[in-house]
Amino acid sequence: MKKLIWLVDTSLDGYMSGPNGELDWLGADVDDEFWTDVNALLGTVDAALFGRTTYQNFEQYWPAVPGNPASPKNEVEFSKWIEKTPKHVASTTLSNLSWNNSFLRRADVASSVSKMKEGKGKHVLMFGSCNLATQLFEAGVIDELQIRIHPIVLGAGRPAFKHGMVSRKLKLVHSKTFGSGVIGLRYEL
């Protein structure tokens, strides 16, 4: 059976983005070592899952990367991977998706994702998407959490974990400290 892996980058104080959705703080810590880790994870998955906001952020940024001569090689490689990878988007407000290989999931997302996990192939990777993650976490659909904690305190922003989430004990199965100061943690749920 496939696993649903939730991948999230946070500040030390637990925010996925700054108060106005800023992600510029991530750039300082994204080096070759970081990308090597990301690419190893990408080799284990063949589908991506998003909430609406994260999907729209990805759609706005990644398709333009290959055409920008200033784009780093690692970003170009990721943009090619995400372009060809099936992208499943949980949204009740979007009516259609124009990005290549994108599929809308409107009804009972937890059940829909559980059915995805029953199929053949590699695992499913959910990027960020804290609202969707909360719903799937509480439904018991997420199998693994990979969290990368960056050496910055934002003070405010969008929290990775919503206040009032159900309590659940996780099992740490791997940890890594990157030269940039990022700490990567992998938990089984």
Image (cartoon, grey):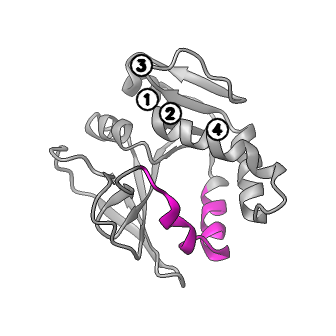
Tell me the magenta residue range.
21-41
Q: Residue at x 72, y 29 (%)?
A: 100
Q: In the picture provided, is 2 more to the left or to the right than 31?
A: left
* Mark nearer the N terminus (3 vs 4): 3
Decide: marks 2, 1 in contact (CB < 8 A)?
yes
**50 vs 91: above or below:** below
Which is more toward the observer, 108 or 13?
Answer: 13
What secondary structure is the magenta-colored segment mainly? helix
* Residue with the mark numbered 2: 117
- Which residue shows up at 45% across the image and 24% down it? 91
Q: Disc 3 designates what residue?
A: 92
**Badge 1: how crowded within 10 Å, few (<14), some, or many (20+)?**
some
Residue labelled with disc 4: 121
Mark 4: give few (<14), some (14-19) or many (20+) Cα within 10 Å.
some
Q: Specify the amino acid type for callout 4.
A: Gly
Q: Which SS class for mark 1?
A: helix
